Amino acid sequence: MDTTTWILLVAIFAMWVSLNCSLVVVYLILTGKSSLPQGGSKKKRRSKKATSVARVC
């Protein structure tokens, strides 16, 4: 086997591994068995309370 064949085989194998890993991740997220908290990795923002500032004249 020449170099071109090896490069092609490695590229196909890398794509196969990548596809399988991403399918597993999608399955885990959809079934709720992932280690991420519910709602993904988005953090909740705290609501800012309006504060009144007294003017000094």
Image (cartoon, grey):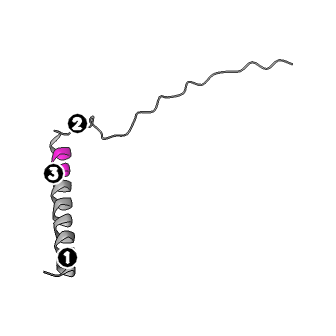
Q: Which amino acid does label 1 sit on?
A: Leu
Which mark is drawn over residue 35?
2
Q: What residue type is labelled 3?
A: Val
Q: Which residue is drawn at 63% across and 22% down?
A: 51
Q: Main secondary structure of the magenta part?
A: helix
Q: Which amino acid does label 2 sit on?
A: Ser
Label 2 element class: loop
Q: Which residue is drawn at 82% across and 17% down?
A: 56
Of mark 1 and mark 2, the one earlier in the sequence is 1
Q: Pinpoint residue 48: horizontal percent, then vertical percent.
A: 54, 27
Corner quadrant of residue 21: bottom left
User: Badge 2, how many Cα within 10 Å: few under 14, some, many 20+?
Assistant: few
Label 3 element class: helix
Q: Give the range drawn in magenta.
A: 24-30
Of mark 1 and mark 3, the one earlier in the sequence is 1
Residue at the limit of the structure toward the right, as seen here? 57
Q: Pick the residue in front: 45 or 14.
A: 14
Corner quadrant of residue 54: top right
Q: Pinpoint residue 6: horizontal percent, then vertical percent.
A: 18, 75
Q: Is residue 36 left or right of residue 49?
A: left
User: Does the magenta run of residues contain 27?
Assistant: yes
User: Badge 3, how many Cα within 10 Å: few under 14, some, many 20+?
Assistant: few
Q: Pinpoint residue 38: horizontal percent, then vertical percent.
A: 26, 36
Task: Report the residue marked by disc 1.
Answer: 8
Task: Report the residue marked by disc 3.
Answer: 24
Corner quadrant of residue 23: bottom left
